[in-house]
Amino acid sequence: MKHHIFVCTSCRLNGTQKGFCCTKGSAEIVRKFQDEIEERELEGEVTVTNTGCFSRCKKGPIVVIYPDSVWYGGVKADDVATIMDRHIKNGKIVEELRI
């Protein structure tokens, strides 16, 4: 696997989603990443996982890209294609979203 994308969906240990990122559309961001990975035929090279809180709520929704350890904040579903094009495909950090 080349990249692992983590998206905060504010999931709590009891399974409920109550936090900031969830209320700002992070579940849709996960779906968009899944769609982009599938459309670009990157299964096995790129995976996306929803996570619990990263404790950076004011900067959310949060997306973290590994192994690059790059954190993006204020991500919207419309930003997913940009992250996929610039970061995942071309290795360029999307500076306007970086935190």
Image: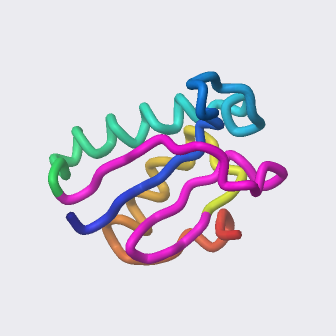
Dividing the picture into quadrants, the one containing residue 15 is top right
Location of the N terminus by quadrant is bottom left
Say which of 36 and 19 sits in front.
Answer: 19
Q: Residue at x 43, y 36 (%)?
A: 32
Q: Residue at x 70, y 39 (%)?
A: 21
Whole-percent x, y for residue 20 in the image: 77, 37
Say which of 96 and 26 sits in front.
Answer: 26
Q: Residue furthest top?
A: 16
Say which of 61 and 49 sits in front.
Answer: 49
Whole-percent x, y for residue 90 in the image: 34, 73
Q: Is residue 68 left or right of residue 62?
A: left
| Image coloring type | rainbow
Q: Is residue 43 above or below residue 97?
A: above
The part of the chain drawn in magenta is 45-71
Q: Residue at x 72, y 33 (%)?
A: 24
Say which of 74 and 12 sits in front.
Answer: 12
Q: Is residue 3 left or right of residue 53?
A: left
Asked if the magenta segment contains residue 93, the reply would be: no
